[in-house]
Image (cartoon, helix red, strand yellow):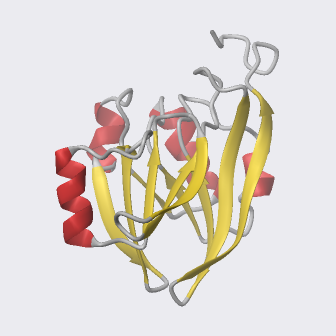
Amino acid sequence: MQIGLISDTHGYIDPKLERIFAGCDEIWHAGDWGNYEDTVVKLKAICPIVKGVFGNIDGQDIRAEFPEYICFFAERLKVSMIHIGNPRGIYTATLNDWLRKDKPKLFICGHSHILKVVQDKKFNHLHMNPGAAGMHGFHHVRTVLRFQINEGKISNLEAVELGPRTAENFPSAT
């Protein structure tokens, strides 16, 4: 199973994602989508199966389709996802409870705009944050992750740079 992982698009889907996520079985979005038509619709045109969670900037249209937190299996790998995770290794009490109960092997979040793939020894899971793919925020380089899952194992993990977050690429960026 090929996965494209993205977050913090803030209403912008880079045209390169059509090529980067070509062949993906699913695209997972870790929140802060932005405008529904500019993000969800475009991602579903690349890959019809799009899973995700809402972020703190998302409106009711996104929140109506995507929950705050999800836990699911992909190729026998238990995955949980929330937008605001643990930027400094500290989880909220609610998230601590969810992670203790669900015991995922892969935990995904967004929000920090910082690309991160690290083993969390406290919960014994792999923690992924794809960084930010949009033009809004403090990040300098836009990033996504792409990987495969086969029989509960992650392989061929790639961090893909989309290019700089600059006003030249997106004139309304601030």
Nearer to us in this view, 118 or 138? 118
Q: As displayed, is residue 63 above or below residue 23?
A: above
Q: Which residue extends farthest front? A: 121
Front-lying residue, 143 or 52: 143
Q: Position of residue 10 (x, y in %)?
A: 53, 28
Drawn side of residue 24 relative to residue 106, left or right: right
> In the depicted view, which residue is nearer to us: 164 or 33?
164
Residue 161, percent from left and from top: 78, 43
Q: 143 above or below 119?
A: above
Residue at point 33%, 36% (across, down): 61
Q: Quadrant of the N terminus?
A: bottom right
Counting from the top left corner in percent of width and height, residue 135 is at 65, 24
Rendered position, 174 above or below 31 = above
Residue in the picture at 59% in, 38% down:
114
The image quarter containing residue 86 is top left
Which quarter of the rendering shows the C terminus? top right
Q: Residue at x 70, y 35 (%)?
A: 142
Instruction: Tell me how many marks there are.
Output: 0
Q: Position of residue 64 (x, y in %)?
A: 27, 43
| Point 29% across, 72% down: residue | 103
Q: Residue furthest bottom?
A: 151
